Amino acid sequence: MAKTLEDNLVNLFSSNRLSFYKYDSKDTDSMALERYLYNIEVLKSLYPLLSILEISLRNRINQAIETVVKSNWLLNELNNQNILLPNEYKKLLDAKQKLLNKGHKNICTDDLIAELSLGFWIHLCTKRYKTVLWHRQGFFRTVFADYPNFSEFDKLSKVFPILQLMLKLRNRVFHHEIIINHSYGINNCYKDLRRLLGYISKDSIVYLDKICDFNNIITKQKPQ
């Protein structure tokens, strides 16, 4: 008996991978395949938001440190550790080594910003960096320029859970993992991350809404 297109796709993607898309022991390969393909559509639709968020966040944090704490801080930090704690300092040194391995002879700030992981920048938003960074006058406002209430107490604690959500979701999306069954709800994830981007720049929301297809994808007929 000739194999169907569905049979070929199940074989191509592997039953093991599709098993993550079976919510019940009675679920068939066909149901899992539908969910798998739908998950790909959702992953794709989230890429613009996550990409803009990641680039905007790291650039704003770097800008805040440059203007409020110390200019040329990344290059200075390589030679004289003043701001970073051991874990983040090691990541900075590792980033420099990776750039050298890629053939970079004259490493600049932009090279380091691009090479450092999203996790590095989000770790700079933890309470361990409150004194050296976030309690500095104007630091929070530089990063989250369009936050709705700057007089609010401990604003960082309001933002940090969304940053953690961003990091976890970003890693799942970029590693092509299942997200359509996210415990928080993928709609809620999108709304929170879109709001976070609005804290950084309201203008970026206007641009995002022109290129992002998430709302159209998520309102389609979902696989059962």
Image (cartoon, rainbow, N blue to C red):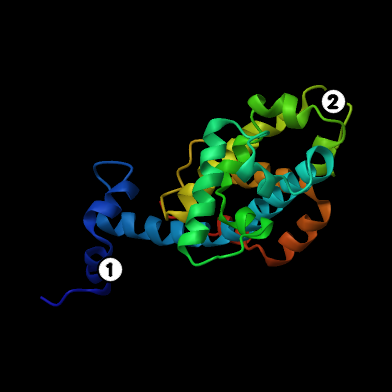
For the residues labelled 2 and 1, say whether their Cβ atoms are less than 8 Å apart: no
* Total labels drawn: 2
Q: Badge 1 is on which residue? A: 9
- Residue 207 seen: yes
Q: Which mark is residue 200?
A: none
The residue carrying pointer 1 sits among few (fewer than 14), some (14 to 19) or many (20 or more) residues within 10 Å by Cα, namely few
Question: At 77% across and 23% down in the image, what residue appears?
Answer: 154
Q: Position of residue 124 (x, y in %)?
A: 64, 36
Return the residue found at the far top: 153
Q: Is residue 50 above or below residue 154?
A: below
Where in the figure is residue 142, as x and y percent of width and height? 83, 43
Q: Amino acid at mark 2?
A: Glu
State which tag comes first along the sequence, 2 or 1.
Answer: 1
Say if 42 sits above or below 71 in the image.
below
- Going by the numbered disc 1, the residue's amino acid type is Leu
Secondary structure type for disc 1: helix
Question: Which residue is farthest right?
Answer: 151
Q: Is residue 67 left or right of residue 82?
A: right
